[in-house]
Image (cartoon, grey):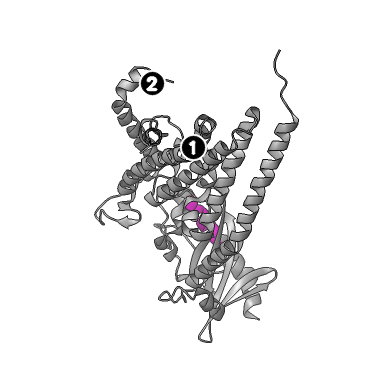
Amino acid sequence: MPRQKRILYPVLFMIIITIVFTSVLAIVNELAKDRIEIQSKLKQQTKILKTFNIIDSSNTTNINEQYNQKINEKTIDNISYFKAVDDGKLIGYAFIVEGSGLWGKITALIAFDSEFKTILGVDFLSHSETPGLGGRIDEEWFIEQFDNILVFENRADNLLFKPAIGSNIDSISGATLTSKAVIDLFNQQIIFILSDIKGGLQSE
Amino acid sequence: MNKKVKKIITLGIWEDNAIFRQILGICSALAVTNLMMNSLVMGLGLMFVTAFSELTVSLIRQFTPKHIRMMVQTLIISAYVIIVDIFLKAYYPSISEALGPYVGLIITNCIIMGRCESFAQKNPPLYSFLDGLASGAGYAIILMLIAFVRELLGFGSLFGYPVLGDAWVSWTLMIMPPGAFFMLAIVIWISKNIFKENSEQGGAKS
């Protein structure tokens, strides 16, 4: 006759061991939470300063200080933006934009000059593109290409891949879809920002 | 050195190496080996998780009801993986970012469960801990080996430092998934030849 499996003991055992491990994880998580928060904030602040090109890279220990000095976080029509002022001079505005990439959501930063005539720079805050291929959108050479590109409100493709006429961006070979997703995302958001947000900001 | 300790180490790193002898954990071996740094962190993470999971499983093995042991093991493994994930996020955010989802996927690595099930269930805690370290090291070494070739040929660099110079034309194939398959196949092919006699005696036939 097969031996009857005990029910109560295994269930109790599982409950107890789950409680033990969950509490350990909760404690570890609680201890690390502040540090993770600081790290991700620091990363975002560095990137914002970098897109405005006003980062003092000789001193990376006072990013927080530099940021508080130069950047104002504000909102307009429920859209938050970053206003950069350096030495009393208005540098420009930056926005966090989102869109879909090849595998998942891409969150990016885009900064304009105070007149909304050129892009000062872009950067990516988070994405889940293929490491080594689409993931290379993080690389400096790709991001740098967006610096100082003129933008126009009535143009749908402010950013265009080489070698088309009037083109300005090299796509990443081996990552055609990611490159395309990134360009589409920026083109859409540029039009949106120029036509819907720009007026409100400048009349402020 | 104690004879059993020596045996555990040689088995874990060489004779029963998880990747080329047991063909376990190869999903992550294919995925993260395009950069040496990623492979190193992944290897260390796996050593940590395997060692401590085996230790814990072994410590509570007498109290664990046999028919729910898999659930218990999964729970233990997940807990340690989450600790590794949190640690990387808090102290090495750049590496955590580079590895992306693969840290979390250590949970699904067959090596850990395999060792917990086949070794830690039957052996005392200290030996189990050591076995975890050895198996993890075996995995890490092979990962580094594959990553060495892939990063060198695919990027012309090692640990991110360029070594082959500007004249080197990178083999994009090596950093794409096929590169991983080729390299892994070569490693297994070579090991198969080294261990030829053993398998002819029926040692590693499946």
Q: Secondary structure at mark 1?
A: helix
Q: Residue at x 66, y 72 (%)?
A: A75
* For residue B131, side relative to residue A5 (left or right): left
Looking at the picture, tell me which residue is in the foreground, B44 or A101. B44
Q: Nearer the viewer, residue A139 or A153?
A: A139
Task: Give, as a single range, the part of the protein colored magenta.
Answer: A178-187
Q: Amino acid at mark 2?
A: Gly
- Mark sitting on residue B203: 2
Q: Nearer the viewer, residue B162 or A160?
A: B162
Q: Are marks 2 and 1 on the same chain?
A: yes
Q: Where's residue B99, x and y in %? A: 48, 50
Badge 2 element? loop
Which of the chains bears the disc numbered 2? B
Q: Residue furthest top?
A: A1
Q: Label 2: few (<14), some or many (≥20) within 10 Å? A: few
Going by the numbered disc 1, the residue's amino acid type is: Ser
- Who's the residue at 71% across and 24% down the image? A5
- Which chain is indicated by disc 1? B
Q: Main secondary structure of the magenta part?
A: helix
Q: Is residue A9 magenta?
A: no
Give the mark count.
Answer: 2
Give the CA distance from mark 2 to mark 1.
23 Å
Q: Is residue A43 visible?
A: yes
Up/down of B83 relative to A147, above or below:
above
**Residue B56 coordinates in the image, percent (x, y):** 56, 41
Task: Indicate which disc, 2 or 1, sits on the residue closer to the N terminus.
Answer: 1
Residue ID for mark 1 = B128
Question: Depth-wise, is mark 2 or mark 1 nearer the camera?
Answer: 1
